[in-house]
Structures are given as structure tokens and as C-alpha cells.
Image (tube, coloured by chain):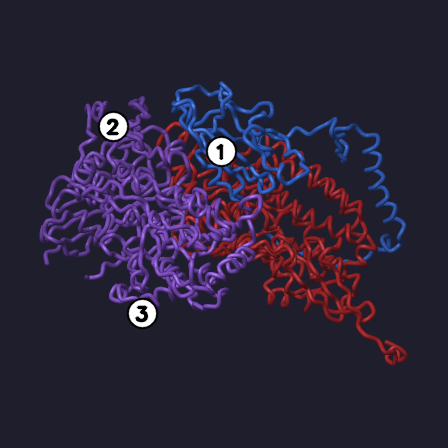
Chain colours: A purple, B blue, C red
Amino acid sequence: MPSVNIDGTSVEFKPGDSILKTAKKAGIEIPYYCWHPRLSVAANCRICLVELEKSPKLVPACQTPCGDGMVVRTKSDKVKETQKAVHEFLLINHPIDCPICDQAGECKLQNYYMKLQLDQGPMQDEKAHKPRLEELGPYVLYNGERCVMCTRCVRFMEEIAKDRQLGVFERGDHVRIGVFPNKPLDNPYSLNVVDVCPVGALTSSVFRFKQRVWFLSRSPSICPGCAKGCNVKVDHRSGIVYRLLPRENDAVNQSWLCDEGRLTYARANDGRLTTAAMLGPQGVDSAAANAALDRAIQLLKPVADSKQGMAAVLSLHATCEEAYLFGRFVKEVCGVDEVALLAYADGVADRFLRQADKNPNRAGVTRVLCDLGLKTTDVASLCNKATSAVKALLVLGHEGAELERLAAWAAKLEIVVQVAAARSPLTAKAHVTLPATNWVQADGTWQNGALRLQRLVPAFAPQDAARPAHEWLADLANGLGVAFALSSPATIRAEIERRLPSFAAAKISTVPAEGYSPAS
Amino acid sequence: MAIRVRKQVEFSFYEKSYLPEVARGVFVTLSHFFHNLFGRRATRPLQTLRYPYERRVYPQRFRGQHRLLAREDGSPRCVACYMCATACPAYCIHIVAAESPDPKIEKYPAAFEIDMLRCIYCGFCVEACPEDAIRMDTGIHTPAFLRREDAVVGRVDLMSLSGQAGTPPAFGAQNYREKKPAGA
Amino acid sequence: MSDVAHDLPTRHMEVNLGPSHPAMHGTIRIKVELDGEVIVKSTTEVGFLHRAFEKECESVHWAQCMPYTDRLNYVSPLINNFGFAAAVEKLLSVEIPERAKYIRVLMAEISRIADHVTCLAAVAMELGGFTPFLYLMEAREFLYDLIEEVCGARVTVNYARFGGVAFDLPDGFAARVRAALVKVFKLLDDTDKLLTRNRIFIDRTLGVGKITAEQAVAYGITGPFLRATGVDYDVRKAHPYDVYERMEFDIPVGDNGDSYDRWLVRLEEARQSRKIIHQALAQIPPGPVLLEDPRFVLPPKEKVHTTIEGLMNHFKLVIDGARVPPGEVYSFSEAGNGELGFYLVSDGGGKPYKCRVRSPCFVIMGAMDDVLLKGATIADVVPIFGSVNMIGGECDR
């Protein structure tokens, strides 16, 4: 294998790779603004200039391909001086905006200043003034003064989103990024330009001023927006989710997210249920968790004894573990043979990330139920059944298209028990509501449309009385005389792997961080 | 740099006969007594001020109750940058940022609360503020309160206080950014 | 004990002193077993003011630990501040400007006088002399006025910064210091006149709480406590820091190691501190009081308000904390009670990995049960404990 010598270490490289890419793989740090691993090379920021033996001038590491036997120095005095000078020039017209700029804390200018510059430029003149608050699109704001013209956003729109909505206009001191006349930045992937922008020039109007990034904790999770299952990072503080960012996964979403999926972060905050509730004469009242659980057991006892008259509704946002416990509960304890699936209706799909199926776990839930021997139907068909034939309704989940209809139908029933993470039209009609954890708090597995199993990691602990849905189901089963003995998601996964044929080969209990696609 | 050693204590005859020492001691205390009673106010050993009618003037640097400074038009200088909340070792400042109606200012604090019960009066918030929006130069102590909730002082109350006489005019990053001279 | 007493069925009486006790200042509990009035066994319990300083420091940035150090020895907070800052400066391998060194010496000595004055006042009060207590409290007020003028607060000073001190001395400070010291020492001399040759005072403190030099060194005791036994160890002379080599001062040393000697040593040390202060005021050069090093010092306000580099620097330092290079250091200085040591471990990040305080009075408390209180009478507990000058904040951290 050919190799280059970087800072005294010999590093092997793939022919065609640039010095920057090779150094990055070897763990040697070379700074960059305009380079992005998934975009074309622009080489306009000049911060990655390195010393190349036998070359009179410094060369941009992002653009120079490696040659066998090259000697590169990235930490020599000449390189350090150049980095200082380049950084000084990048800051010449930069406004003193840090107090009002959202990028503070994750800004490349701030970070590289501390690493490379630590110095003052001598410029005393007035800085160039440009428009500071331009709405490029419904979610993206542009500040011309902060822009360093790295053109990452332009290249993203052209090469990844394949929609040339951004361009570079004017030149010299007047240069700016802009949209074309009558064509705002309304591409469904527009918020990715906020991710790639290394400074605070492009910011999200949704996240604007909500929180400072250094207060946020970060957890890996999966986007609940559709069956693609893009990997996300959940940024949260004190139990509130502030934003979703894409997590790197070559097999699913590379480093991108669609706007629709990104904006599902609000679903983790809105209307969260943290206390149990029971329906009393004056309407729904909050109740102690134990009291609500006992009442639910009491209500479901006749159905459990007769094994007749139970209707079950399961949301497609449930994890495989929750679906498994739900399926076992309704089949073994209540004698149900058909489960209605609560789902969002199909939506827009495209050739990039968005899938038509807007539910994150249809594949997993349907396979779990099928392997348990249960038939599946939809909520519409369930609501067509006569309410006289149904004594009780058990609902797990709160997200779906037909909730109004289900609520109206359930209003006529005698017993409605729901286990849900947030308020929905059904909450006002449920006799017992048990608060569950949502996808941000769940330790579970989703299977996306391509049958890839991906893990959800809890970002923060459930508050007050909220508990994972599988714990509620296990307690209900216990109260009705059936012991499930499944204490944790790990044990549930082990049992799924053992018992359900669809998941045996998939090895659900050992899904790694980047997910796992079974060979079949 | 010599080292001195204390001599062993031996009572002299003078000291063993009690009364001379007693007289000396009483002389000391009586001199204090007469000085305090009849001496000039300024040179008395005992400096008692008839508070609240007479008050000590606190030095300029005294760290008392915080205050938020206002711009010339009355809006807060604070742009909710969260530097003070980050620098505070006691985590006593809570801010909620919001979009300012003035596009030149962009950001302002919709809520700015300091929990005075948590505050340790270190002055890091003043040091951290890049806009010269928060100062502790009011020269007053935090007023007493009867309930814990009253100790959380909000933006309106913080802006209603003014600095001691002789505080310098406000100057911060916004004066450069918005091209304003040093203001109140 | 007479023969009659031997035949009587008696038990030792257990008396509990503290933690809530007028003489147990700083909250400490001493459980004594008495045979009549003589202490047969004593158990000292410390820790009532434990606030997890060392653990707390691990969760905040380096600079945010400074207000916590104020609250260690809260009678001389400036010495704690400077000790911590000096330790971090050793990790950073930087030297502070000359003027900052002089200011540190000056303010530390003012603080030391305040510490000794408080100890003398407490000893006097607990033995019944309320007058000298109030004289010395008045003296302390003059010192607090000086400290407040410079630092902005009397006790919660937060004055030291890595690279120097936070603010320069105000104008006319030297004259005010000299005027204040005249008043302070007038009151100290009055106290001296009232107590030092006082028969009752000497009866209560001479020969009480004796500790030999070997025992003191074996326990690791330092400061006035050690010097009262005859050992002339003072960190300012043995391992000079800041500008102490340029100061001329003597170290008072006692003979017996009893409470009376400790009283005399502290009194004389306050006078030596005055000597140092006068020299510092005479020698102090003009210049900056804080380094300008963008790696760990907040940039000057003009740069923060008018340049993007200064503003970014400021933001990064506040958000991430100063990045102290990885390493460990034990840095020690002479506090009011002895050698105050800071053992710091840095892992290269913005927060300390470990911050351990070697507090001088905690070490002295170790000798309480086995040496100081053994064989003493219950009335002796007060002068012994008073002369230890146990500051709860420092002992328990």
C-alpha cells in the first residue's frame, strides 16, 4: 500500500485520497472550514494549508492528492504562522455577534481561534456591512456578515439535495449567499445547510434563541418521522428536547436529515403525560399510579376471565419490545386474536431519505404480532365494529391518523384503558390512563422499512409516574394472574430472539450502535 | 531574617502584688471610655453610625444587589447571551431568550431571574457580561423578604435599580455592534 | 484521690461540648470523659461544616472554584484565594507580574493580621474578657474596610485570578492602609496591656495544652502552633513564594508550646505582618496586575467590546473554562494557621480532576485527643481549643 509521511509518521492511503482525508483517518488533526467529507472539494478557505516537501508554497491538504513517498508537515512553524494569518483574514469582517449568535459553543471560528490563533489582528477599519437577517426559506435564516463564504451550503444543495436553490452572488466585499428571485429555500432538506454551516451565518429559525448549546446533553436515537429510521442525536436539557441533529450512518442517512423528521422533536415535548389519570364523574382526574393500575386491573378482570370482548390497538411508534409484551398480553391474558394498528397515513416520499410510510416501526410491530400469531387490521375497520360486541379497549400509543375517530368510537365503550406517553383525543375518554415513556426515553428497537434493526437509547429518565410501557403491561398481567417475568428490555429482547422466527436471525438482542441489517 | 524567641514568663514583684496591674488595666479601659464619651467623633476608637440615619458610603467596587442596565430608550441592554448564567458558580441566573422587536438588537431576555438565595455575590456575572448589562454597583444589600419565592428577582425589578453615585457609563459590545456611544 | 474516694462506687462523667456551643466556634464536638474535673478520655468530632468543597470543585470550571476557596478559612479568605491561584499557575507554568506579587503579599498580610486578631479575640472572650474581644473586633473592622475597598467584599472576596489579581489597588490606598494599621495596632497594644501580663489570664493559659516540638512535628502541625513549641518553620522563610524573599521580618518562636506561648506568638506575628505591609507598600512597582494570556485569562474588557477575537476568546473561556495542561501539583503557602496546601490534578480539561486541600487546623485537630486534652481539666478545653484557632470552614472543607 502506498504511504505518505505526515509529521514523521508513515500513514497508508488509498490512491486518490487527499492529504486531509488520509490524515483524518489516521487521527492527525488538520483544520478545515470549506471541506466536508461528503461534499466536493472547494479549497477556498485556505486554513488547511500544509507544508509539502519539495514544494515552494504551502498546499491545501483538502485538495492535494496523496502521492507515494510524500512528506507532509502539518505542525511546523510556517504552517502555524499561516494558520494564524488565514484565521485573521477570516475574521476581518466578522461582526462581534457572539452574544446574539446561536452558533456560539459549536462555532468553528471560536474553536479554531482557541487552537490556532490566540492573537489579535491589527485591523482597525470599519468592517463590511451586509444584510443581517434574511429569511432564505421557511426554516433558514441568513446573516451575511457572519458568512465566511465557504460555499458548503451551495455545494450541499447542488450535490446532495440536488436542487440548486442557493447560489453565490456578487464578489469582493459584497459577496453573499442568496436564493434566486421568487424561489425561496423551500427544499425539504433545507435545514441541513444549517448543520453544514461552520459559522452562524445560516441558522435555524425553529431553534432560534431557544437554548445555548453548551447546556444541552446529547443522546443517540432514531428519528420517528418515517420508516427510513434516520439516525439522530437528541439535544436535550432537563427533560426537554430542543432539537434533533443527524447522526452519521453510512447505511441509512449518511449525515443528513429531512426537515420533516427534524421537526418531530416537538412531539417529544408536547402534551407529555407524567401522571396517571382516571375517568371520574367530573371528567378525567389525575390519580396515583397504584390506584390507576389497580383500577385498570379491576376493569379488565372480567375480560381476562372470559377471554372475550377485548379490542386492542397498538401504535406503530411502539418499540419491538413494547409490541411483544402488548401482543403477549392481549393474546394470553385477554384472548384477543386481532390487533388494530394505529398509524399515520402515508405521505410524501422521495428518492433521498423520505419514505411514504410515516411510521417508524411498522416492520417491527407487524412482524412481532405476526410471529405471535395475531392478525392485524387498521383502526378504521375496528371502528366499524359494533360497540355492543366490544367490552373493553386497550390502547398502547398516542400517535396516529385516526385518533379522533377512535376516540368517538371508544366513547361508547364501557372500558377504555390506554397506555400512552402524551395527550391525544383519546385521553379525555379513557377510563384509566397509564403514563408511558416516549421514543426519546425508551430503551428499545425499531425496524425500519429496509428491515434494519436500530436501537433507541434513553436520553433522560421518565418523570413522575411515567414508566416504560412494557413495565405497565407486565404489572397488568401480574394483576390478572399471568406472570411475564420480563424485567428489562434486554431480557425482552433475549426472549424475542429465542421465540420469534423473524428476529432470530436478526439477533435483536445484540444490535450494535449503527444498527443491523439482516442478510435476508 | 533573624528568629526571635520569647522569654520564659516570670512574674515581677510589681506584678505579683495585684493592684498595680489592676490599676493599669482599669486605666486602659477608662481611657477608652472617656475617649468614646467625650472625644471628637472622628477620632473615637468606637465608630458607631446611627443607622439608618447615618450610613456608611460603600466603596465603588462593593458587590451588592445586582441590577440590569437599560439602553437610552429603556429597553434592556442585556441580549440574553447566557454568559452570566454560564459563569455563575451557584447556577442562580435563569434566562429565557426571545426575539427582540427591534431587528438591530435581535435578541433580548423575555425572562431574567436571579435567585438571590443561591447567589454567592462573587461578581463573576459582571465579569462575564460582554454587553455591560449587569452590574452589582447599586450599593445596597439585597432587600429582605418573607417568602422564599420573593427571593427570585425578575427582570423588571432588576431594571428598576440604579447604580451608586459615580458609576461609569455603560459600554459593551453592543456599543460597537450598533454604533452607539457609551450610554447610561 | 483519697482512700475514701477509692471506695465510693463512681463512674466517669461524660460531658458533651458542642457542636452548638459558644466556645466551640466553627462547630465542633468534643465528648469528654471526666474523672472529677480531669479529662480522662476525649473524642473530637469534626465535619459539621463539611460542604464537599473538594468534590464540588470537580464539577465546576477552574475559575469558578475561586469563590469556593473564599469559604475555606473564611477569616483570611485572601490567603486561600492566592494559594489556589498559585497552585493553578504552577500547573500553567506562568509567572505573575511583579505588581501582582506585591499586591498578593500585601493583601495576604492584611488578611493574616485579621486572622490572628480574630483568634486572639476569641481566646480572650472565651476566658471571660469581653472587652478585648470588642477592641479586636473593632480593629478587624478597619482591616475589613481596607479589604472591601480593594476586593469589593469583606469576606467573600473572590480577588485572585490565574495570572494575578482581579483589580488594581484604588488610588490613595497606601495612605489609608497606614492610617488603618495605626488604629489597629493601638487596639492590639491595648489588648496586650490588658491580658498578656494579666495574672488570671496567665493562670489559665500558662502550661495548658502543652505539646512538645517532637510531638508537633510528628503530627505534621505547622504555623503558630508549631512555632510556639520552638520550631522555627515558616513557609514564607523556608520556601519563599511571591516576593517574601525581599521582605525583612522575624519569625516569633516560643519555648513551651502551651496556650500562653501561642497567644504571644500570634500577637508578635501580627506585628511582623505590619512590618511586611509597610515594606510592600514602599517597594510596590507600577505595572499590570493581571497577565494577558488568551489561553486562560479573560481578555481585557476593551478587547471584548470592540474586537471579534477578544469576544470569541472571552466566550470560549467562559463556556469551556481555562484549559489547564494535564499534570499534578502540590502548592503550599503560609496561612494563618500553618501550611495551607493545594494538591491539584488536571486532566487537560476545563474542570479540575481532583482538588485536595491540606488544611492546617485539621492537622492540629488530630493532636487534640491524644496530646492536647490528655490530662487537662475541663476548664482548660476552652483556652486550648481557642488557641488552636480551628476555623470550621478550613478544617472540614
Q: Secondary structure at mark 2?
A: loop
Residue at 76% x, 46% y is C133
Mark in the foreground, 1 or 3 = 3
User: What residue is disc 2 on?
Assistant: A184
Q: Is residue A493 above or below residue B62?
A: below
Nearer to us in this view, B143 or A426: A426
* Quadrant in which residue A510 is drawn: bottom left
- Residue A14, position as x, y percentages in the image: 12, 53
Looking at the rendered structure, the kind of residue marked 2 is Pro
The disc placed on residue A297 is none
Looking at the rendered structure, the kind of residue marked 1 is Pro
Q: Secondary structure at mark 3?
A: helix
Q: Is residue B135 visible?
A: yes
Q: Residues within 10 Å of mark 1 (few under 14, many from 20)?
A: few
Q: CA distance from mark 2 to mark 1?
A: 61 Å
Q: CA distance from mark 3 to mark 2?
A: 53 Å
Q: Are marks 1 and 3 on the same chain?
A: no
Nearer to us in this view, B101 or B54: B101
Q: Is residue C238 visible?
A: no
User: What residue is disc 1 on?
Assistant: C286
The disc placed on residue A498 is 3
